[in-house]
Image (cartoon, rainbow, N blue to C red):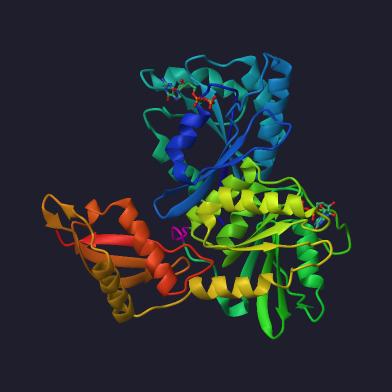
């Protein structure tokens, strides 16, 4: 689990600028909640062996018509939600505009909040730090920390200090081992039917649920057994939380979702056949792909649809989710239990593919066959050479290819290799990554 840093502050203080500096934006995940005018953005970053997650409450997503009250309310709501999810709050103020009443309002809220809060004074570039800090002491939030997000000034030092209490964790650490079973993360946006599916998966006949639930942040891990196989379900919907107290699903949390993706072997992503695909689905899916996790897609609420609607939905999914075509696609009804059992063979297959090991001999032969079938192009009159392949990791599988001038290998050729390896090695349900090394 990464420590979670929330960036809060009024508009224009530099939250997005800092967010971009702190994250690899490729990974950023946007949570667009209906009814809110501002999006929250989630991204991961890394500093000195520590990984962290940053939440930016800054982006205005349109639909604003000069309604200041509305903006303030929406911002306050986003900030509160972000603070709720965070371990650390960075409260940004602007050295150039100085202290203004909106800052005081936010500070009042932060002072009563229990979260560890750092007062960060941005845009100190070209200013004398000491005097730029002076007026912010009155906020009563301790030492102001001067930075310049757009120049990077003091940013690393600050984050280093902020992360000091948190332990180191290997970047892109693989999920925990499979000793207790295949770890299944059930994910998806609100209302697609995650809770219903979790209950259905656990309520199936002959499923034995063990009573040794652990937790990953707030998501509950539920170990169970089915037909002699062990699994651990990571329940982001909070179905089994505080048994018997309340079965109402909790509010959707991106952080729980990110944790589940990180901690699972196979993600089961639930989509809603009735509402169709929305941006949030695609953002989430994109994130799963970037994370390299094995994936099974479940289109839920398939019951009671007219066959026309089904055809329409099926073709929309095929068209828009083409980039996730390695994942098995199931049309299910969690409510009625239809086809829910079919998820298991896909989960097993995806897990097997994601954790498979292939010998260097096999991979190299496969590479040479692929190359003789279809030669890489010439670059400056010299042919790109691909000589040898070995496995560099698993979950997701990484194939390392050695050769000459590999940096000039066109994308189309990489796709050809990926498809060929995928087909021959029968890899389904997991992304497969290639790394190219060059002798010269
Ligand atoms: P947000 O609304 O809080 O997300 O603020 P932005 O990140 O969009 O920044 C608002 C403006 O401040 C932009 O024009 C940025 O280029 C500028 N800005 C951000 N950080 C700095 C900084 O460290 N120094 C200066 N001079 N300008 C900055
Ligand atoms: P979550 O927010 O993703 O956990 O979604 P829930 O499991 O709470 O389901 C949201 C709503 O969709 C509830 O009213 C469910 O009864 C309904 N629902 C869930 N699965 C199905 C299904 O397979 N078919 C139909 N028709 N409704 C479903």
412 versus 146 height, above or below? below
71 versus 430 height, above or below? above
Q: Residue 413 lies in what quarter of the image?
A: bottom left
Question: Is 81 positioned to the left or the right of 176 in the image?
Answer: right
Asked whether residue 276 is drawn in magenta, I would say no
Q: Nearer the viewer, residue 270 or 28?
A: 270
Q: On the rendered image, what quadrant is the N terminus found in?
A: bottom right
Q: Residue at x 57, y 45 (%)?
A: 283
Label the magenta part by its dominant secondary structure. loop
Q: Nearer the viewer, residue 38 or 424?
A: 424
Q: Position of residue 110 (x, y in %)?
A: 67, 32
Q: Residue 209 lies in what quarter of the image?
A: bottom right
Question: Is 334 positioned to the left or the right of 49 in the image?
Answer: right
Q: Position of residue 182 (x, y in %)?
A: 61, 74
Q: Residue at x 71, y 84 (%)?
A: 227
Q: Position of residue 402 (x, y in %)?
A: 23, 66
Q: Which residues are magenta?
A: 168-172
Q: Position of residue 85 (x, y in %)?
A: 66, 45
């Amino acid at each position: 689990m990464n420590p979670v840093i929330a960036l809060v502050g009024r508009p224009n203080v530099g939250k997005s600028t800092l967010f971009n500096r702190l994250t690899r934006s490729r990974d950023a995940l946007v949570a667009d909640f209906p009814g809110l005018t501002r999006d929250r953005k989630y991204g991961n970053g890394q500093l000195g062996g520590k990984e962290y997650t940053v939440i930016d409450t800054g982006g205005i997503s349109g639909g604003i018509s000069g309604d200041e009250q509305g903006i303030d309310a929406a911002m306050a709501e986003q900030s509160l939600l972000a603070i709720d999810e965070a371990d650390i709050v960075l409260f940004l103020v602007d050295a150039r505009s100085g202290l203004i009443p909106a800052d005081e309002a936010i500070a009042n809220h932060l002072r009563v909040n229990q979260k560890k809060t750092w007062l960060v004074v941005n845009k100190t570039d070209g200013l004398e730090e000491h005097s730029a800090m002076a007026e912010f002491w009155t906020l009563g939030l301790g030492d102001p920390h001067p930075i310049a997000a757009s120049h990077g000034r003091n940013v690393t030092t600050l984050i280093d200090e902020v992360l000091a209490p948190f332990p180191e964790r290997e970047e892109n650490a693989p999920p925990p081992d499979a000793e207790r079973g295949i770890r299944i993360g059930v994910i998806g946006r609100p209302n697609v039917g995650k809770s219903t599916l979790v209950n259905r998966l656990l309520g199936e006949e002959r499923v034995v649920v063990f009573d040794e639930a652990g937790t990953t942040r707030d998501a509950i891990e539920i170990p169970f057994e089915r037909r002699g196989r062990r699994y651990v379900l990571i329940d982001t919907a909070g179905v089994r939380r505080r048994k018997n107290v309340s079965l109402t699903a909790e509010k959707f949390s991106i952080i729980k979702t990110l944790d589940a993706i990180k901690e699972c072997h196979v993600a089961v992503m639930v989509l809603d056949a009735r509402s169709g695909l929305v941006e949030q689905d695609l953002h989430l899916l994109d994130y799963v792909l970037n994370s390299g996790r094995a994936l099974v897609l479940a289109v839920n609420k398939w019951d009671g649809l007219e066959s026309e609607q089904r055809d329409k939905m099926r073709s929309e999914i095929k068209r828009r989710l083409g980039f996730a075509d390695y994942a098995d696609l199931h049309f299910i009804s969690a409510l009625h239990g239809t086809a829910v059992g079919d998820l298991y063979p896909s989960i097993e297959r995806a897990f097997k593919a994601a954790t498979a090991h292939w010998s260097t001999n096999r991979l190299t032969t496969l590479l040479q066959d692929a190359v003789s079938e279809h030669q890489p192009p010439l670059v400056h009159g010299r042919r790109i050479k691909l000589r040898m392949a070995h496995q560099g990791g698993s979950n997701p599988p990484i194939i390392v290819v050695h050769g000459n001038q590999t940096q000039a290998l066109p994308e189309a050729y990489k796709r050809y290799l990926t498809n060929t390896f995928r087909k021959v090695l029968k890899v389904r349900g997991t992304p497969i990554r290639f790394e190219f090394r060059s002798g010269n």
